[in-house]
Image (cartoon, coloured by chain):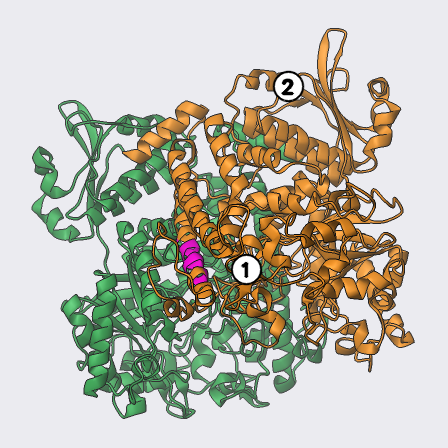
Chain colours: A orange, B green
């Protein structure tokens, strides 16, 4: 009878009329479940009569969302009234009339074009909610904020909110191919059904736009940075236009990844030299053509001279030459170029860590005003932990944006619960010292040090055809957190988790608090069982699935694991001090000293910068070997603990999602054990030390783990 | 305000508390929306107190479904009572006690192991519903029937239902590959997430099983008939086991497609000769291994010596030798072999139509008792219209099952509204005369003429990762109709459409009647704009997308279109009379005469059997050329009419699905016009006759249509 009791439980606690539908996660954080708290009465008061004229598609999107929200949260449909009659007034500033007197010039100044003001206004014994903004988009963002406040159980009785996005470009990068495979996608396949476009607009496209708008995302790069030229053909531009039209009401502009050699492959020119007049002409014409389909097209994302992709260097030109040529084509249409700093040429460098800095630092100030350099959070490639990228802060006269990876390429795909906000925050709060003390990555990304520059944040999407969008119910939190941090890099991981849990599950403190603790710790758990103490890039080859510290024989040395951990019988770690690659030299002096000096270098970053003996004595008093083993075992233990916490929360979670997460945590545990045993046994062949007493002995020997074979690993979509 | 008014409309008509969720089609025909008719009171009466003890997972599945249904349909949760107290009693016959007296021995006899009895019983002034059956599966099927009756607005006050399935094997064939591509799949990708199995049971697997059980489907072949040997490895058998465990409560057994050369490719033997002792040993061991994972494993589906697949003939053995060898391995476990009759060898035959009959007719009676031959409805390959397969009825001493294609490989993929039940019924009601008059395909498939034989029906699934499962909201009807016809081949297309529309949309006669008419006509519409008058196999090459009557140069002649239409300046059509390939000779004499004689051969089949001059005078008085043109234009016009009908029904359909179908119909219209224009212009190059006056002139010339190029056509998944 468990099912029956659960239904009764749900009814009792939420007082809803029974729904036949299970929680399949499709609704993300926009579930609008009935409000059960005593705030319900207060909320209803504000939404009996509303004044929300919607003359544009964007305003209509906002009003429809509010009405849907009221229906779900309160089961009411407001009637329309005049500003004077209404308890909720939603008007742009130019139409707000006498209510203007409640808004200060400073507030209007502050919100800019995308911000909004929400106030609870008491006048002549009446209390009203007022939402206003300069633009329709500001209004849309404000409506989602009102819904968020209700979903998270906040009072509306004394609001005085003035909010606006701290960065300009808040964008998802989809590594989606025209054949619908997704490179590094672990939630199924691409949600873009190219074959059925432009004629068929999957309702999912609109729900995608709603979800993004609800967290302030304003752009979407539709296709893989390893770009297929097909996307630039008229047939596909028709399809891109259809998506742009579907997204427009929600303030989402579409962008495309382009292949630098398109003039040759698509235009049949002899060269793609960015200074060649024919090439320039071709890109200008192609860009004009794109804008003839999509007047508000966002621009291009370019991966050039990296991992085999063509680029300006193939023609003896610089990244600036290439980016500016495209920038010139886009400028008349107010489009931008996002040029990736993730580059490494065909020669294996002494240290890949240094390559982006070496190539881009000399180009500072040489990029057009509509070109922005997209820099990954770390110098290698989205590892569980990386130090901040040395280019961050090193380009004072160049627009830069941060590239974060939401899809869990190196964080357990879609079976490991890893809340990434702490990882993102670790980077955003890193002090680069490039503009004096406290010149954090966050402040640089905000454009604090050069108001003339473009700003932005990109997230490599973790979205696919899975019904719950992200494969793991908790992976949705990474999409959510990315949007919240792109809106404001100073938001903190805990409050974002709190909001997300409330909107996605419920407002029960007995659920929120323990689960929030687990989320906040989850990334460190994974670092511990995968790459503790600054280890990096030791995952399985090509598929990047599971452990592969033994990987030593791939296409090039800097694709292997041994290149990065450099384990030998003497010790382990990559010496990046002046006795080694001296990559540290790319940081400000304070950072060089901090990471370079063993007295100050945190354990978390130790092997990123130092090659140390197995007997090296750690702060804990343990040897390096003992400490490493300890971290691997701690990582697994913390997954076990997370499983126990989840089990204890079953009364607060619907049976479908409870079971899903329970199963996924079991898979995570199994894979964490495999990581631990593989790495401990492998590194033991160098340390030649026993696994200290008290730790469970690995179930199998090293050869067992080395010989495991996994066919059809997802996320290896070929273009 | 449209959205607002629609919400109010919904509330007004259905009296629901508002749901924030749009109709995205995920719930299929199991939506359980609140009953708004005056039957509500009657229904509630029966479900206040129920007696439904559930000691097994299968009974629990049935009870959970009922409770979910009551909650959705009536918003009530019944309390549990004794048989005496309860208004609904659900008990297997062995537990039914005194209620036994209301059930006759004849009824018990009739229902067999999978059937059920539902009666409204009045006794001592009390009226109760009783559901009983011999097995838990019968009970499960009965619970779904009770829910169907309520969903379709039927009274429960005087039920006396005795029902049971007319065929034994009611199965979906998934042409799904381990990499999740789906051969001929047009609804996204495979719902089997092999990488996350066995640890993660996607809730979708259970909803898949529920939907199948609700229509009586009791088996699922998980992988493509072009089989990947990976499926037989221990790692994948673990995953198959996990799916089997998830399906078992719903009475779904899993089956696997196997590659005949597995002993070589997987077992590293030198041969796969079915008479080789080592080969026999290998299959016996592999089969035992499978059953060690899945004790109720269903068996194997085999595509042998067809389209490059290996088979017994590669070793000089017969299909019977191959099938019986596998049958022997499965027999101890009560598994079966489904051996496909869709074969053609490497030599291009004079007429592929004849090949299956030529190969299998001589083998009648030579197959083991647990081998069943799976025969497509027609002799070629799931064309919009085919005559019934000449093997149907020609194997009186061999178990045969019908293979139908639900996925619309030749019926417009997932953008054309084509209700396939009329196509299926056309085959089922064809009189083979092989056992005297009225020995219809349906009666043969039922096993009417040889009770000793196995019976069954297979449907090539149209299911994928799309949220609505089938890509087109109306494509769900083909999955539904297949189940209903496999349960009872004598069900009629109209009543199945009626039930499906009511369960999937609503019970409004003003919606049901016009839409049912469109569904029933939809397949003929598509025949008209694709392949009228018996044309067949003239679609685009390889991708099978759109028209390709000009296709003339592929790997082998019988893959081209010209091989089948044989158009020349003299005329068009494939002469299969004795003056031609004499394929007709494979049918019973009555059928030979019927199709062979121009006086009796229906226009619909004309060019399947006759090559006729362009001036041939049709029954209508038109020439063949004029008639053909007329059909092509009529097909497009009927799509236009269908669009108008749909528009007129907007008040009865939720906005999301209304818009989806509206868009899909527009795509269908565009593609129908392309089919019409391409075919009319192409055949005109032979007929050299003008398009008769009054018909719209094609927008483009033939070369335009011939040169259209469509990249990334779905459904070409490679294994």
Q: What is the magenta segment's predominant secondary structure?
A: helix
Residue toward you, B391 or A212 = A212
* Segment colored magenta: A670-679
Quickly name the residue at label 2: A48
SS label for mark 1? loop
Q: In x, y percent, where is residue B311?
A: 32, 84
Q: Quick check: is A676 in the magenta stretch?
A: yes
Crowding near the residue tagged with mark 2, few <14, some 14–19, many ≥20 C-alpha atoms within 10 Å: some
Quickly name the residue at label 1: A189
Q: In x, y percent, where is residue A56?
A: 77, 38
Image quadrant containing the N terminus of chain B = top right
Q: Is residue B544 above or below residue B489?
A: below
Image quadrant containing the C terminus of chain B = bottom left
Mark 1 falls within which chain? A
Q: Is residue B435 visible?
A: no
Q: Quick check: is A381 in the magenta stretch?
A: no
| For marks 1 and 2 on the same chain, the one whose residue lies earlier in the sequence | 2
């Amino acid at each position: 009878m468990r099912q029956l009791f659960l239904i009764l439980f749900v009814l009792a606690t939420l007082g809803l009329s029974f729904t036949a539908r299970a929680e399949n996660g499709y609704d993300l954080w926009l579930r609008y479940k009935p409000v059960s708290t005593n705030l319900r009465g207060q909320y209803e008061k504000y939404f009996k009569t509303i004044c929300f004229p919607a003359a544009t598609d964007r305003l209509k999107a906002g009003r429809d969302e509010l009405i849907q929200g009221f229906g779900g949260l309160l089961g009411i449909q407001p009637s329309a009234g005049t500003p004077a009659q209404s308890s909720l007034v939603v008007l742009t500033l130019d139409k707000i009339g006498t209510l203007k007197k409640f808004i200060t010039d400073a507030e209007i100044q502050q919100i800019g074009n995308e911000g909004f003001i929400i106030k609870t206004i008491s006048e002549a014994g009446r209390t009203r909610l007022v939402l206003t903004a300069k633009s329709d988009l500001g209004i849309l963002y404000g409506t989602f904020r009102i819904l968020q406040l209700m979903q998270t159980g906040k009072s509306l009785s004394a609001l005085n909110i003035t909010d606006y996005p701290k960065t300009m470009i808040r964008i998802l990068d989809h590594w989606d191919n025209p054949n619908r495979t997704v490179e590094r996608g672990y939630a199924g396949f691409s949600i873009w059904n190219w074959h059925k476009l432009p004629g068929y607009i999957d309702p999912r496209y609109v729900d995608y736009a709603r979800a993004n708008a609800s967290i302030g995302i304003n752009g979407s790069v539709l296709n893989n940075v390893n770009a297929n030229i097909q996307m630039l053909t008229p047939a596909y531009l028709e399809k891109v236009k259809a998506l742009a039209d579907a997204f427009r009401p929600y303030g989402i502009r579409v962008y495309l990844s382009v292949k630098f050699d398109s003039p040759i492959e698509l235009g049949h020119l002899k060269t793609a030299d960015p200074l060649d007049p024919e090439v320039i002409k071709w890109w200008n014409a192609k860009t004009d053509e794109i804008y003839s389909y999509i007047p508000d097209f966002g621009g291009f994302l370019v991966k050039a001279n990296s991992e085999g992709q063509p680029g300006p260097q193939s023609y003896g030109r610089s990244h600036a030459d290439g980016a500016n040529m495209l920038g010139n084509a886009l400028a008349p249409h107010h489009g931008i170029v996002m040029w990736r700093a993730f580059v490494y040429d065909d020669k294996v460098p002494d240290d890949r860590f240094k390559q982006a800095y070496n190539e881009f630092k000399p180009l500072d100030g040489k990029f057009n005003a509509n070109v922005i350099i997209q820099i990954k959070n770390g110098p290698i490639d989205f590892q569980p932990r990386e130090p901040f990228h040395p280019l961050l802060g090193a380009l004072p006269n160049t627009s830069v944006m941060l590239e974060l990876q939401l899809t869990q390429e190196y964080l357990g795909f879609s079976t490991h619960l890893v809340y990434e906000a702490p990882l993102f925050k670790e980077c955003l709060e890193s002090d680069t010292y490039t503009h004096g003390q406290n010149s954090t990555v966050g402040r640089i990304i905000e454009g604090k040090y050069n108001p003339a520059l473009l700003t932005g944040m990109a997230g490599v999407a973790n979205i696919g055809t899975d019904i719950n969008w992200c494969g793991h119910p908790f992976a949705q939190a990474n999409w959510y957190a990315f949007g919240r941090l792109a809106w404001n890099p100073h938001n903190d991981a805990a409050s974002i988790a709190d909001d997300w849990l409330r909107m996605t599950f419920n407002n029960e403190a007995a659920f929120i608090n323990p689960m929030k603790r687990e989320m906040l710790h989850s990334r460190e758990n994974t670092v511990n069982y995968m790459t503790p103490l600054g280890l990096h890039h030791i995952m399985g080859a090509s598929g990047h699935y599971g452990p592969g510290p033994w990987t030593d024989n791939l296409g090039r040395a800097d694709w292997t694991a041994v290149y990065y951990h450099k384990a030998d019988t003497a010790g382990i770690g990559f010496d990046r001090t002046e006795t080694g690659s001296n990559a540290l030299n790319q940081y400000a002096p304070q950072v060089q000293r901090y990471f370079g000096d063993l007295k100050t270098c945190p354990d978390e970053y130790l092997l990123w910068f130092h090659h140390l003996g197995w007997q090296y004595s750690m702060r804990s008093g343990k040897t390096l070997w003992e400490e490493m083993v300890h971290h691997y075992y701690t990582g697994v233990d913390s997954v076990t603990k997370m499983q126990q916490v989840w089990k204890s929360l079953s009364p607060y979670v619907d049976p479908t999602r409870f079971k899903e997460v329970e199963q996924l945590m079991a898979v995570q545990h199994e894979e964490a054990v495999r990581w631990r045993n593989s790495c401990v046994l492998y590194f033991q062949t160098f340390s030649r030390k026993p696994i200290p007493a008290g730790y469970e002995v690995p179930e199998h020997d090293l050869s067992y783990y080395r010989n495991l074979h996994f066919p059809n690993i997802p996320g290896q979509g070929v273009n």
